[in-house]
Image: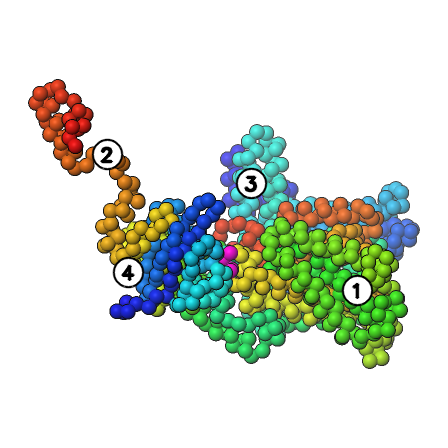
Amino acid sequence: MTTSTPTPVLEARNVTMRFGGLTAVRSVDFTVNAGEIVGLIGPNGAGKTTFFNCLTGLYVPTEGTVSYKGTVLPPKPHLVTQAGIARTFQNIRLFANMTVLENVLVGRHTRTKEGLWSALLRGPGFKKAEKASEERAMELLEFIGLAHKRDHLSRNLPYGEQRKLEIARALASEPGLILLDEPTAGMNPQETRATEELVFAIRDKGVAVLLIEHDMRFVFNLSDRVAVLVQGEKLVEGTSEVVQADERVIAAYLGEPFEGAPGEAEAAEVEAAEAAADATGTTSTTSTKGEGQ
Amino acid sequence: MTDLTKTTAAEPGLIPLPAAAARALTLVGGIATAVSAFLAWTWTSEFPGDLTITGYPGGLQWLTFTGGLLITLFALAAYGIRGLGWLVPGGNNGPIVLTALGTFGTTWFTVVAIAVNLDGLVNLEPGAYVAAVASLLTVIGAFALPTTAGETRNAKAAYDAGLRKGGIASQSRVVIATLKGFAAYIGKPDRVPAPGPLAPWAERVVITVVTMIGLGVFTYGIDTEYGELFIGYLILVVFAMWAVHSAGLIDRFSRLVAHHRGFTLAMGFAAAILFPFTQTDDHYANIGVNILIFGTVALGLNIVVGLAGLLDLGYVAFLGVGAYTAALVSGSEFSKFSGVQFPFWAAALSGAAASLIFGVLIGAPTLRLRGDYLAIVTLGFGEIFRIAVNNMDGVSGPDITNGPNGIPSIPDLDFFGFNFGDSHDVAGFTLGRFANYYLLMVLIMAIVVLVYTRAADSRIGRSWIAIREDETAATAMGINGFRVKLIAFALGAALAGLAGTVSAHVTYSVVPTPYQFAGSTPPNSAFLLAAVVLGGMGTVAGPLLGAALLYLLPEKLVFLQDKSLLAFGIALIVLMRFRPEGIIANRRNQLEFHETGQLDVPDTETLADDPAVTKAGA
């Protein structure tokens, strides 16, 4: 998919978000190119969702700018969506008491114009627009495989289908970039695999994807690039292999060995000392270690 | 204990009687009750309605007669008489039990009222005893009926649960079992078989007939001349409606309505237009017009509260703005602009426009708040309007509204020589002043209903509901929350202002006092909100029904007087406990308030096999 000269869809420059004394996101530079799937990972509390909220205008970044296809985005969620960035939420936020179809139609809001007057007067333009909206929404429901449930209330869908519906609702705004906030949270392996295919299908529609995820296998399978956010700062960015091999990433997830922890050399020395102790039966291991350096 | 729970066939009734005997008893009792209405119940015509004549029912006796007739119909349907099967599609005995209870209630209420009003049982003629005994026997018969197959599972589960719970004393066990059994009686069967196919014209005929019956029942309620009759009417109507609901007929009817939405709406308006022609006294047309004004404003509030989910506690102020604007340009000599007299269309438009501007002015700063804070601020603004109008008398403020005296002697409207103040003869019927205004109000209400339904079913309506459901998600979907909410607020305000322009002419004068937060007479903000919540949020018929109820109750039950607010409070609490979605539920709310855990499946499948029908006769 990626061409030799990648065109950036999303460019975040020097984004910083402070809540009082707490800096949740610290000067992050970040780019998503057209046709890319980019993963954003990091330990809990690393600031991933905060960064997402900065991108989508739910938070106004303390410093820095976010631009979409070269134009700087105003920090208002509805304007960001209008510009072409759609998102889903970590904890599903569907319109619970609306039907499946209505949920997707709400997603079409930015791509339709009919205001109050046209709704009241019901001219031919209104009917045409409603019909077109509905057709487009049904296409999306076909795409995620929920067309047969169009008249069900979304609250009554099973969990996995709610996640899918949220993606369809986001896609309804015809975005150039879709942000998925933990799309597989709470899913079983089969559902996760289905979501994987769905994300590829979305990418094949020409929509760039940025996703936050904790399921590492999922992220590394999918992503063209992965960025790691730790304590609000971008640690590494690169292909799956690069990130997986990076020691700092492993350290961030598993913890660094503390200062003075036994390294390989020490371990060998300890073993040798133990062997010696076995032979002599007296020497203490701690004293040999102290001399070892 | 096990032998009690072992019963697997249809549960026997609460009263031990053979099923056949019970069934016969309900039928005979129903007929006897209906016939007893033709006897004299008391000797003197001092009791209102004149119940002294043998051979012709009067006043409350009509209600007993109607009740007896309904029982007879349901009882005959239960016998499987051909042509009556449609009355009880669920095949349950609930309708019989409920109509029997309703008739029993009205009849005994009448008998007791006679004895109390005229001091003593001596005043009862034998006819009254016949009626009382007949209606009591019917109730006994009804409770001896088996809870039918459709309910067997429920009833049995209820019995079992009752027996399990009350393990301490056998007596409490029986009481609980009885209560649960009672609930099983009056509940709606789980599955109501879908109706057979009907020709579209036949469906329209059904809708027409139902609308006309509705008009008849409603007109009867408005025309009740004394409190006792209204109470008896209320008892019968509530139980009869409940019976019809329990029979599953309301479900069937709403399915019909869903197919013929436009036609039903047209029939509803036809019925509304017919109302003044059924009235001989202009007083009742006055009640009608006030209900319409109240209902129209409640429907406007329904956009704000029911669709967009913005709790507005100062809504009546917009009615006030419309009324004051119309009064100022009406040509009244007490108006500040006494020389100016707008034609009505211009006055109506300026009233709506003034309300709209006022709505935007209030909405722009307050709609940035959410939830409780919005409610508090709107409450404040509502009161500010009333107090400001009170003070604009030239002493405490600029001289615009004449202060507490208001603007009196507003002239009647005149459309091309058709003066609304005079009586007119139309096709042999005399339409008085209030009937004229009533018809004008029907037109305004039609506009508001049209605006409501069209706005609700559109892009903007969907975004209102989305905002109500989850504002953050809605904005993330590209909805400009503030703008959309402001449109809802302004639209609601404009509709209330429109209704206000008519109300100014109907009441001859506008004064600040009615436009308050809470008072004992509608409309005020609290009553408007109560009408919306009571009737059913997010529906068209709900607020209208709620408004009619809230207007009629204090109007008819004069004896409640200052206790009417207390009565409302209790009624509202009871309703919120048992039917939080309001009397007329919209599907969304119904599912929201009753967690059933079952998936809602759109009404597409037909339930072919239903054992209830066959077992009902057993």
Q: CA distance from mark 1 to mark 2?
A: 84 Å
Nearer the N terminus, badge 4 or badge 2? 4
Indicate which label's residue lies in the foreground, 1 or 3. Answer: 1
On the rendered structure, is B392 left or right of B103? right
Classify mark 4: residues with Cα within 10 Å, few (<14), some (14-19) or many (20+): some
Percent position of residue B1, x then y? 53, 33
Check disc 1 and give the amino acid type: Tyr
The disc, 1 or 3, on the residue closer to the chain's N-terminal end is: 3
- Taking B477 as reference, is B288 left or right? right
Which chain does the numbered disc 2 sit on?
A
Discs 4 and 2 share one subunit = yes
Q: Main secondary structure of the magenta part?
A: helix
Provide the chain ID for the residue under circle 3: B
Name the image quarter holding the N terminus of chain A.
bottom left
The residue that label 2 is drawn on is A260
* Chain to which mark 4 belongs: A
Q: Quadrant of the C terminus of chain A?
A: top left
